[in-house]
Image (cartoon, rainbow, N blue to C red):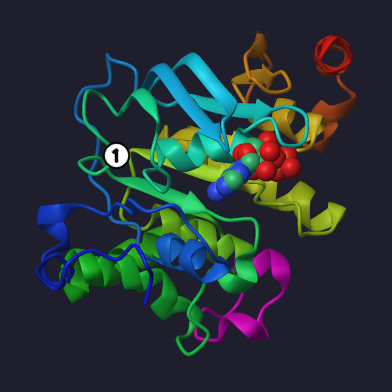
């Protein structure tokens, strides 16, 4: 049982409470549980930012991570967050997703709290993010069942996701019978199953080999753009950040500020060929210069 799981009454009424994990996560189990339980609602007002962070404050052991941090993410935008180790990338999305409390400031989804909004979350460690006793298809069905969707709608949604992601492998196999890339793809499908307003991805490809990463991120950006899903990606990989994002937020060391907020005006879809495009190379150089300077300054 996840330590942050709410009261028994809310377990029977996820529609009423929404899916939110309010406690700080203390174990991989808690993280995985939170990943497994995403419930969401579709956005209805695209004109306002999908996510607004204002005056964010967060410290650990008296050491500030964020002190008056602001951020807006537009509806349908893919934002990559890149920065040095320990600058607070995961902390930022964990607070935004409602998995970790803020010390001050606000994080609102189109004017609502994380508790009221629907989010999806994909974790780096796909092995701990699924129920091993359920087939992969049942893992994907799980958040829809928790949301109380009708069986026919669940199957239609599953078919839709299979088509969107061009799934060729057998979803009736158990997660441990699949490759790492297939398991992470299933994690992404599960996070999207209930049509979240914002999708959070915390280094989703870092445990995968390069070939799998290339094919999975090509597929993912196609789907995210086709469905206009607001996405926040934390990545350690500058190439990946630029290849996947409309905008790369480059963070400094702690106390964390924005070193650069770099638009990525490259056409979609982005393919492996994009990586050798001169415009891509120029953006990567700019980002690398900013990163080097911001790390050196600290
Ligand atoms: N629950 C916690 N308790 C104490 N310190 C924490 C906690 N969570 C994060 N920190 C600290 O806050 C800082 C930011 O951590 P975070 O994981 O957000 O950084 P990050 O930029 O995602 O790091 P990395 O690039 O290494 O994944 C780190 O110094 C980390 O040790």
Quadrant where the N terminus is found in the figure: bottom left
Quadrant where the C terminus is found in the figure: top right
| Image x and y of residue 290, in percent | 81, 10
* Whether residue 230 is situated above or below residue 254 in the rendered picture: below
| 180 inside magenta stretch | yes
* Whether residue 211 is situated above or below residue 59 in the rendered picture: below
Furthest residue in direction bottom, as rendered: 133
Which of the two residues, 153 or 255, is positioned nearer the viewer here? 255
Which of the two residues, 167 or 98, is positioned nearer the viewer here? 98
Q: Is residue 92 left or right of residue 184?
A: left
User: Does residue 47 appear in this view?
Assistant: yes
How many marks are shown on the rendered structure?
1
What is the span of residues highlighted in magenta in the rendered image? 169-183
Q: Residue at x 27, y 49 (%)?
A: 40
Which of the two residues, 261 or 176, is positioned nearer the viewer here? 261
Q: Is residue 240 left or right of residue 193?
A: right
| Image x and y of residue 166, in percent | 56, 59
| 238 inside magenta stretch | no
* Residue density around tag 1, few if under 14, some if 14–19, many if 20 or more, within 10 Å: many
Which residue bears the numbered disc 1?
Answer: 114
The image quarter containing residue 155 is bottom left
User: Does residue 73 appear in this view?
Assistant: no
Furthest residue in direction front, as rendered: 62
Q: Is mark 1 within 8 Å of ligand 1?
A: no
* Whether residue 103 is situated above or below residue 123 in the rendered picture: above
Q: Which SS class for mark 1?
A: loop
């Amino acid at each position: 049982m996840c330590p942050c799981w709410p009261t028994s009454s809310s377990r029977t009424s996820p529609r009423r409470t929404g899916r939110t994990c309010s406690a700080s996560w203390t174990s991989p189990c808690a993280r995985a549980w939170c990943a497994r339980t995403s419930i969401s609602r579709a956005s209805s007002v695209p004109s306002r930012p999908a996510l607004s962070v204002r005056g964010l404050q967060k410290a650990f052991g008296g050491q500030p991570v964020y002190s008056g941090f602001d951020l807006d993410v537009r509806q349908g935008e893919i934002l990559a967050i890149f920065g040095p180790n320990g600058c607070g990338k995961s902390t930022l999305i964990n607070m935004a997703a409602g998995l970790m409390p803020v010390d001050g400031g606000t994080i609102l989804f189109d004017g609502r709290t994380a508790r009221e909004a629907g989010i999806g979350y994909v974790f780096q460690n796909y092995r701990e993010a699924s129920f091993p006793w359920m087939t992969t298809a049942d893992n994907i069905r799980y958040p829809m069942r928790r949301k109380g969707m009708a069986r026919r709608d669940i199957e239609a949604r599953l078919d839709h996701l299979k088509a969107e992601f061009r799934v060729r492998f057998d979803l009736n196999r158990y997660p441990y019978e699949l490759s790492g890339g297939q398991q992470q793809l299933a994690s992404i499908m599960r996070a999207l199953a209930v049509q979240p307003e914002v999708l959070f991805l915390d280094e989703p490809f870092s445990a995968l080999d390069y070939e799998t990463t290339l094919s999975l991120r090509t597929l993912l950006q196609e789907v995210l753009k086709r469905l206009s899903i607001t996405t926040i990606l934390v990545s350690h990989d500058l190439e990946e950040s630029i290849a996947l994002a409309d905008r790369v937020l480059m963070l400094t060391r702690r106390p964390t500020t924005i070193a650069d907020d770099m638009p990525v005006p490259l056409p979609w879809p982005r393919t492996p060929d994009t990586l050798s495009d001169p415009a891509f190379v120029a953006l990567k150089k700019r980002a690398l210069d900013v990163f080097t300077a911001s790390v050196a300054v600290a």
